[in-house]
Image: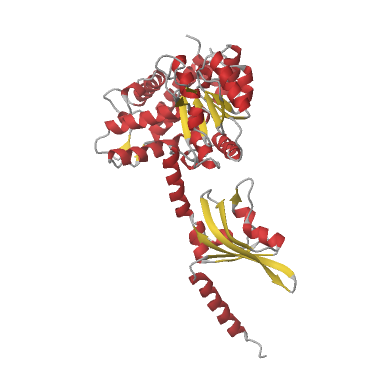
Amino acid sequence: MKKATCDELHNINKMYQRLVDEIDVGVHVVDETGKTIIYNKKMVEIEGMNIEDVLDKNLYDVFSFHHNEDSTLLEALRKGTTIKNAKQTYFNNKGQQITTINHTFPIIEEGTRIGAMEIARDVTKLEKLIRENILKKSGTKYTFDSIIGSSDKIQEVIDASKRATRTSSSVLIIGETGTGKELFAQSIHNGSNRSSKPFISQNCAALPDSLIEGILFGTKKGAFTGSVERPGLFEEADGGTLLLDEVNSLNPSLQAKLLRVLQERTVRRVGDTKDREINVRIIATINEDPIDAISEGRLRKDLYYRLSVVSLFIPPLRERKKDIRDLAQFFIDKYNHLFGMNVLIVEESVLETFEQYDWPGNVRELEHIIEGTMNLIEHEDCISYSHLPIQFRNKPQFNEELKSLDVMEELFIHKGQTVKSLEEYMVEAETYYLKKVLKQHDYNITHAAKALGMSRQNLQYRVKKYQLQRE
């Protein structure tokens, strides 16, 4: 047989590449080491990446998979098995979730596996539609994609929550008011194999003890005056998840009954003698340190141990200030959509003010501030300090800062007169700031120098130079 010339091989290669790029399925081929050698245009489109992000790289350096899952492509390479019509969900290098239906097989040459090939069809949009339909049926609206934040602290909680989706163990979510505890609870439910079943939420502090018992456990007809035959929330949530919000507000006797339900996996309606089997995952929330709640008698120790098989601590917003900018933009987009507005950005000074504030109401407070701000804007497309709600601008800490700014302005310009020279201004500004820091540290030179980031000798020189003695 005649050997192909270099030009012929080049043309064949070009035709082959054109063919691979034109077919309407994703093609991904790795060599015997797991390094990508073929990656067509459709696969680029499916996975939302550039070809150079993937070619000549190991799969694990580019993609990530759920804790208990692996790449079907590498599985075919390692085991030499063909995998047909397998659904796979994984994440690209931007953290975006992708779902494909794959046909994967090893490439064998003279009895040796020299690589593996995957033909993939994109079902990400279809999966999203199915997921949205499930959310409507289960009465939930949040998934892990709903959680905004890239800080290490929030990502650590997200990772732990995702691992909790694999089991049906009880989960205790601990966090201050407004941190998003229910958002995490719904995300865990929707990420689990219970997602097609009910998700029922009950705030235990919202109702008196006389009512909450019947609501949780159900009632038997004739058990008390006016009682009817009615299942409780445990029975209604069968197969799904029951969220008990502020579980520490239940009285001790109800907590004891709840503990029995968790241990026995049966529930007895109020006034009944019959136990009914249930299959419910319990997620509970508490808005204080559980150790304080136990020591002060608001939470039974045995119930705490039973609920906290998985414990999630949601960090307050003041401990994840890196996320404030992303959260602010998310809420702006949300209220743009709701109010038919077109606010685009937030002034840097406003964002810096947000980052200085402690947010006792956490993410919920930030959302309310953004919503209030959007109500005060007229036709502008940028949020400035003057747009912030008056109750926020009147916070004591901001008034102090505004006073300082007024003083600096006085230093900068003589009232109604000419601008000072830069040298004169710099001296006065430095004197003012050094006085302020010295006063904060009760004129302790060592502490003030440390706060200023200068040596003790350097500060002493300036104290003497500017005669900054205690008044």
Near-viewer residue (341 or 175): 175
Q: Residue 248 placed where, x, y %?
A: 53, 18
The residue under the point 63% across, 17% down is 301
Q: Residue 27 placed where, x, y %?
A: 56, 66
Q: Residue 86 placed where, x, y %?
A: 58, 58
As displayed, is residue 352 above or below residue 227? below
Residue 421 at least partly seen? no
Side of 448 where 373 appears, left or right: left
The residue under the point 33% across, 33% down is 384
Near-viewer residue (401 or 30): 30
As displayed, is residue 76 above or below residue 308? below
Quarter occupied by residue 225: top left
Near-viewer residue (394 or 59): 59
Q: Residue 407 placed where, x, y %?
A: 37, 21
Which image quadrant: the N terminus?
A: bottom right
Residue that protrudes farthest toward the top in the picture: 471
As displayed, is residue 196 above or below residue 391? below
The residue under the point 58% across, 12% down is 297
Near-viewer residue (470 or 224): 224
Quarter occupied by residue 152: top right
